Image (spheres, grey):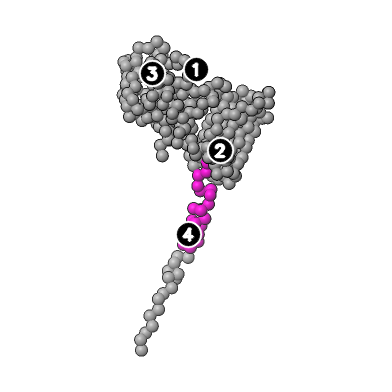
Amino acid sequence: MKRKTEIPDLLIFWPKGLSVYLFLLFLVISSPLTHSKEFSCQLTQTKISQSVEKGPTFLFNSKNYQKGNFKINFKETTVLMWKRGDLIHLLLGSSKKKVSIKTSFSLKRTEFSLTLNPSVRLKCNSRKDSKVEEKVKQTNGLTIPSTGDDLIVEIKKDLLFRYYTKDGFELSRSLIFQKGKIYNQTRAPSKKDPWCLFRIEFKLNEDTLVPNKTKIPVKRAEVFKNNENFTVFSYSFVDFATGKKGMETSRFVPFSIECTIGSKMTFSKKLLDEINQGAFKIYRKY
């Protein structure tokens, strides 16, 4: 008589807690809170005449700001945003009136807004629900990143900084880029046309070359709109809070690049190329 061989039930050998673990893991992975979410934000200021002046439109990605703050300035108003847990924290303040307001919103929200006073308002929409989503998609590859982490300034041409200049201060020297020309000075020849200022600190008392292909990590990127006619895009290569430098060599320390453009202009790759004729580019390292 042949003995019947039975195939053991595999579930007998399946750890009891493993099924529960995999189920919980699936919930965490599929949860929208574990993924980054991007918001398109607009800062506006209403004047006494009731006319609304729109500030810069910017993107806030929750994944990029889990450790540090996103910061943007518009005249006397400062915006700070950061992510902690499942919340977006927001601080809106006025340096002129010495007041500020702080709150938080769930990442599940598709839109949120915060009003500092009757004249200053910040409104953010989830990218999927934003009316400007299509416009952002079209310009995403053309605009230059102006805030956030992992930004790089890459030098594309040899740049010579003269030691003997009219307005050099101690060991600090600057180059001005305007309309495709380069000037060894700290003031732009014309205030009507957009320009960029690249500042370094010498280590030697002689002409210094910043060579082609030099890549400089940005420690802090900010946007300033303190003047109704101009917007300043600032890229600092030194973290003033810690004293850490983005990079340095035996001959120089890169300090900052500031580009000043008209308030109605878009800081695009095309505009930057018109200013510096491809002398340097600014991009985000992914």
- Tag 1: Cα neighbours inside 10 Å, few (<14), some, or many (≥20)? few
Decide which of tag 2 and tag 3 comes sooner along the chain: 2
Indicate which disc residue 207 carries: none
Indicate which disc residue 192 carries: 1
Indicate which disc residue 132 carries: 2
Q: Is residue 118 visible?
A: yes
**Does 112 appear in magenta?**
no
Q: Quadrant of residue 43?
A: top right
Q: CA distance from mark 1 to mark 3?
A: 16 Å
Is residue 253 rendered to the left or right of residue 87?
left
Disc 3 element? strand
Disc 4 element? helix
Residue closest to the eye, 228 or 84: 228
The range drawn in magenta is 17-39
Contact, CB < 8 Å: mark 1 with mark 4? Answer: no
Q: Nearer the viewer, mark 4 or mark 3?
A: 3
Q: Amino acid at mark 3?
A: Ile
Q: Which residue is mark 4?
A: 22
